[in-house]
Amino acid sequence: EAEVAQSPRYKITEKSQAVAFWCDPISGHATLYWYRQILGQGPELLVQFQDESVVDDSQLPKDRFSAERLKGVDSTLKIQPAELGDSAMYLCASSFHSNQPQHFGDGTRLSIL
Amino acid sequence: QKEVEQNSGPLSVPEGAIASLNCTYSDRGSQSFFWYRQYSGKSPELIMSIYSNGDKEDGRFTAQLNKASQYVSLLIRDSQPSDSATYLCAAENTDKLIFGTGTRLQVFP
């Protein structure tokens, strides 16, 4: 079964540094989502793309976070500068259409020192 | 504030028993509902989706939806130790998923 690919799996960096995460959705999936999940909580949506366009970034801390999906396929989420509170699991998900079930990648576990 | 509420657990059941996981949601506009299973340190895995009132069965799993009561549940029959995980309930509204905090299920031999 096709999967959502994410890299890296783990990232350890110091505060104030820049970090970037990459996601390649399931082929043909137009909608792509980035979530942040803090231990013991459910995933929280950061940004949603429909093809190359952002349709929801209301919960994205835009002073330090940015996301792009330039060609409407793979996507990058960046944090600069990273803060201690950014330590979390960053999950990418995709769906064929925005009202269809979402499928998650393996996630990136980010630790800020 | 649109919310999805779940009891955090842990819910402990013996092997072979039925595990019943519950979820309530606040937004009456929600149309689609999903259950995800998440093993410790792993990403969520979709196990059930339900869109209309009533029951939906898939193998050992049954999802139940009652829109009037704003209530969704997941039943796991013949629970196995491998079912031990956190189960996330999610409600969709305006093409956006709102997740609960999850219920941790422990199935003991």
Image (cartoon, coloured by chain):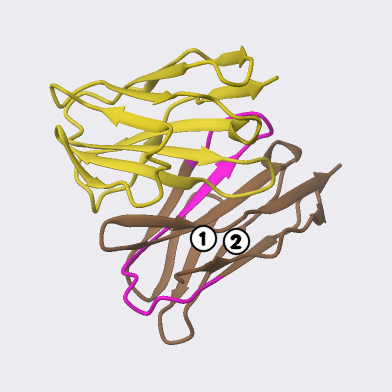
Percent coordinates x, y for residue B45 in the rendering: 49, 38
User: Which residues are the magenta region?
Assistant: B24-45
Q: Residue A80 carries which label?
A: none
Which residue was labeled with disc 2? B75
Q: Nearer the viewer, residue A112 or B107?
A: A112
The amino acid type of the residue labelled 2 equals Leu
Q: Give how far apart the Cα atoms at labels 2 and 1 are.
A: 5 Å
- Pick out the residue farthest to the bottom: B68
In this rendering, the answer to whether B59 lies above or below A6 is below
Q: Classify the position of the N terminus of chain A by image quarter.
A: top left
- Percent of width and height locating residue B64: 48, 69
In this rendering, the answer to whether A27 lies above or below B10 is above
Along the line of sight, the residue nearer the viewer: B13 or B4: B4
- In the picture, measured across the screen, residue B100 lies left or right of residue A84, that is left
Label 1 Cα crowd, 10 Å radius (few <14 / some 14-19 / many 20+)? some
Pointer 2 with pointer 1, Cβ within 8 A: yes
Image colour for chain A is yellow
Rendered image: mark on residue B62: 1
Q: Which of marks 2 and 1 is nearer the N terminus?
A: 1
